[in-house]
Amino acid sequence: MGKEKKKASNHIGYGKSGAATNFITRSQAVRKLQLSLADFRRLCILKGIYPHEPKNKKKVSGGDTAFRTYYYIKDIKYLAHEPIINKFRDHKIFVRKLRRAIGRKEDDIASKLNENKPVYTLDHIVKERYPSFIDALRDLDDAISMLFLFSSMPQTSKIQAIDGEIVAKCRKLSAEFMHYVIQSRSLRKVFLSIKGIYYQVELQGQNVTWIVPYKFSEQVPYDVDFRVMLTFLEFYITLLGFVNFQLYHSINLKYPPQLVRDRAALNHVAVENYCMSDELEDEILIALNQDITKFESAESDTPEIDEFPVDTIDEDATQMKEKMEEEKKFSKLFEGLKFFLSREVPQEALVFVIRCFGGQISWDSLTSIGASYEETDESITHQIVDRPSQKHQFLSRYYVQPQWVFDCVNARTLLSEVEYLAGVVLPPHLSPFVVEEEGDYVPPERRQLLNQTSEEVEIEEENKDLSIHPSQENEGNKRNIEEVLESDSPKAKKVVPVIKAGNNKATSKDVVDSSGRTKEEKKLAIMAMTKKRRRLYERIMHSRKQKRAQACSMF
């Protein structure tokens, strides 16, 4: 006979077997930790513990089909050792004493209690959840998006959950992060959508994407429960503080950031722009138009490619070096250009993007703090406007719409200003996050841009071939022979529909096959396949035909 199970025990999962020993309901977890439901939810958010769905609920619940929320027992045991639980209990006692003092009208006791209010930090939780800095960068998308969301909210909100200090802290942290992106030139993509502006930066090899809402007057809804969002925000504020500190020191910047300009110049700006002197430095920092100080004796941590003799250069090293040179050239996209912003354009987004690529920018000093030169400056090359006509125009500059700046970044080159002049119907703003696959529809503007970039690449390759080394020439001949021998490989080739300008339909003739092989070679390659590979090839070709037909029938 088997051993009889004991029913009475205080241990979690004791007396159970099978899948029931791995899960615990939320009500049982709350009783085990001796917390309220709100504190338990808050603790789970801070520690990164989430509920899990059992594969078979009946086995876990003993045949009961009622809806329950389940957690792993090992996660609840992990939460039981968290020291922040004691801080939650201390805060509960503090609230009870404060209510008693206010009810008895004991103002002295209430003020002393407020001065000795229990506080806690989340530093140890951040270190536990992210052992390495790369782990924190991989989980930075939601954190930055939420901080930018709360930084756009009004500080005088009628909702008690949203405090003005929290909004100011989010605004400062987001401005510090944008200053790092400007100094490191790490912005890669930007897209204007209906929801907001999407940005993508590359931080130590990790792509971080976030969204920033447009600068409109925010109407905070009253039917939204901000308590859960504020718990996430509390953790994200601590996380971004750690990340900003590490990022600033990686490129030898002082943290907290300090402005390069002296205090006397800042006070002069304060008088002109009607700003309080104690708030001036923060307002200048948020304006994103001033440089911040660096450490004097420190060296930069930016990686550099070592130089080797020509005979020992590897193909991967050559490609990496070319990629780094291309990124370095891309980071200087707006260098030598001088911009001026009109009042009607989105100032923060344009200042951030233009300064990320080395451009100089200013605006009317009466609109906001941080302007560096006036509109009458003759050295201005581009003025960003969003109205069809101007009262006074300078012949020495272009009057372009804001989309020109963002399209130049996505195209990674300076586009022609003719299509973006003031009052002109703008071309479509294409998303840089979309990657066309085989048979997908490609807009004519994207096709034209791809052709233009391919022509520039061919010209650069021809210029390189004029000064090619003999050893590299022999290696190139070997690669050509290998490409001919591997011409029947099953690797997929890029097949995209080509649409001529002015046509509204994509015909089947416009779909071009870029494989470069004749029909006879393809037939011979198909005949040489096995039966299994031939069937797989037929399925692939069938799916390609369906994509082509769908692309041709879009209009």
Image (spheres, rainbow, N blue to C red):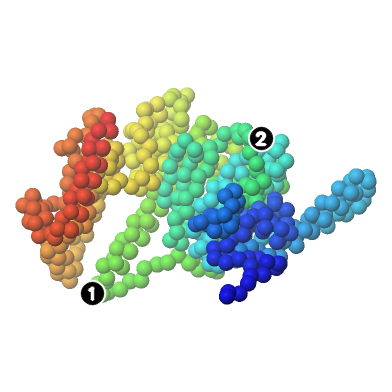
The reply to whether residue 486 is in sight is yes
Q: Which residue is mark 2?
A: 222
**Residue most extreme to the left:** 520
Quarter of the image for residue 270 reads top right
Three-letter code, disc 2: Tyr
The reply to whether residue 245 is in sight is no
Three-letter code, disc 1: Asp
**Residue most extreme to the front:** 1
- Callout 1 environment at 10 Å: few (<14), some (14 to 19), or many (20+)? few
Compare marks 2 and 1 and give the one earlier in the sequence: 2
In x, y percent, where is residue 98? 86, 50
Q: Which residue is mark 1?
A: 311
Query: Viewer-nearest of labels 2 and 1?
Result: 2
Q: Residue at x 56, y 52 (%)?
A: 143
Q: Residue at x 34, y 56 (%)?
A: 326
Q: Residue at x 84, y 51 (%)?
A: 96
In x, y percent, where is residue 349? 50, 42
Question: Which is nearer the eye, 124 or 156?
Answer: 124
The secondary element bearing badge 1 is classed as: helix
Task: State how far apart marks 2 and 1 are (Cα).
Answer: 69 Å
In x, y percent, where is residue 295? 57, 64
Quarter of the image for residue 303 reads bottom left
Looking at the image, do the residues carrying marks 2 and 1 touch, with CB atoms under 8 Å apart? no
Quarter of the image for residue 480 reads bottom left
In x, y percent, where is residue 500? 21, 34
Question: Which is nearer the eye, 363 or 151?
Answer: 151
Placement of the C terminus among the 4 image quadrants:
top left
- Is residue 302 depicted above or below 179 in this figure? below
Placement of the N terminus among the 4 image quadrants:
bottom right
The secondary element bearing badge 2 is classed as: loop
Question: Which is nearer the eye, 508 or 444?
Answer: 508
466 sits to left or right of 118? left
